[in-house]
Amino acid sequence: MKTALIMAGSWLSEFFAAFAEKFSERLDLAHKDIGAEINEAIMQVQMYFNIGDYRLLVTDAILVTFIALIAMLIVIGLLIGKPSKDGKLTKGQALVVSLTELVISTGMGFGMNRKQAEEVTPMIMTFGLVLIACNSISYFHLPPPAKNVAFPVGCAIVAILYVIVMTFKFIGVKGFWISLTQPIAIMLPFRLLDYVVKPLSLALRLFGNVFAAFVFMEFLSISLPLILPGIVGLWFDIIDGVIQAVVFSYLTMSYIGENLETYNEYMEHPEEHQKKKKDKKSKSEAVAA
């Protein structure tokens, strides 16, 4: 027994001595190249897999995205759980229903009817949940996919294509044309330019916020590696990541609503637009005469 206590005491003394040494090294900023360490963290990891004559590139953004998606599905599965036999909703199920209703009511606030809002809700919530998972995973010291500019650009392209597809589905080709040319036809080039600016804005907003938060947290982890990064990370890694996901989803839904609102205004007051056309035609005939 005495021998065991002596051995345990010796092991503990060695452990604390090694811990103190590593602790002092972490706090010794004079011998750290913070810039080089941050630069190393920013650089993406690239791996190539040979499939026959084709080389497949896999980056850390791809791997972390899959990890985040698997984690998200597990959390959602645990949250929803199995349906109860008595038909009552669990707390998790009630939360999901409440969030779904919130998204639907937001879509209706953008000028959609309930059926249209219900149709876009699954995709809008998918955008939000995927981005929340991918942004928040940096709290667990995994690089967020959005620090690679390809990820936010890809998300933005998918979002704007979804906006165009749903606009065609809801109001057709004629309605889409009306959304581009109202209130005056000269708006056409500017509305077309919107479909370049909007995805660019979505991508840069997401990339800029996530990248800045990632760099700041890396600096904090290097310079003050103890409790503070974990506390501050609750904001920059989780809350800020959730905010950016919500903003991305909200704007995507609003872009669909803008197109529908322009079309609905045109259809509610067609006489005004017909009057403008007649006045323009009369002026042209008067000039010609």
Image (spheres, helix red, strand yellow):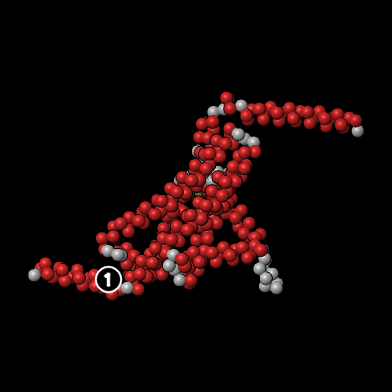
Q: Residue at coordinates 12% horizontally, 69% vertically from top-left? A: 286
Q: Is residue 119 visible?
A: no
Q: Is residue 233 left or right of residue 277?
A: right
Q: Residue at coordinates 60% horizontally, 63% vertically from top-left? A: 96
Quadrant of the frame with the C terminus: bottom left
Q: Quadrant of residue 156?
A: bottom left
Q: Quadrant of residue 83?
A: bottom right
Give, as a three-letter code, the residue at label 1.
His
Q: Which residue is mark 1?
A: 273
Q: Residue at coordinates 32% horizontally, 55% vertically from top-left? A: 193
Q: Is residue 197 left or right of residue 118?
A: left
User: Residue extending furthest left?
Assistant: 289
Q: Residue at coordinates 54% horizontally, 55% vertically from top-left? A: 130
Q: Position of residue 235 (x, y in %)?
A: 57, 46
Quadrant of the frame with the N terminus: top right
Q: Position of residue 191 (x, y in %)?
A: 32, 59
Q: Is residue 171 visible?
A: yes
Give the answer, above or below, for where 201 lies relative to 276.
above
Q: Is residue 66 left or right of residue 166?
A: right
Q: Position of residue 152 (x, y in %)?
A: 46, 50
Total count of labels:
1
Q: Is residue 214 left or right of residue 225?
A: left
Q: Quadrant of residue 28?
A: top right
Q: Secondary structure at mark 1?
A: helix
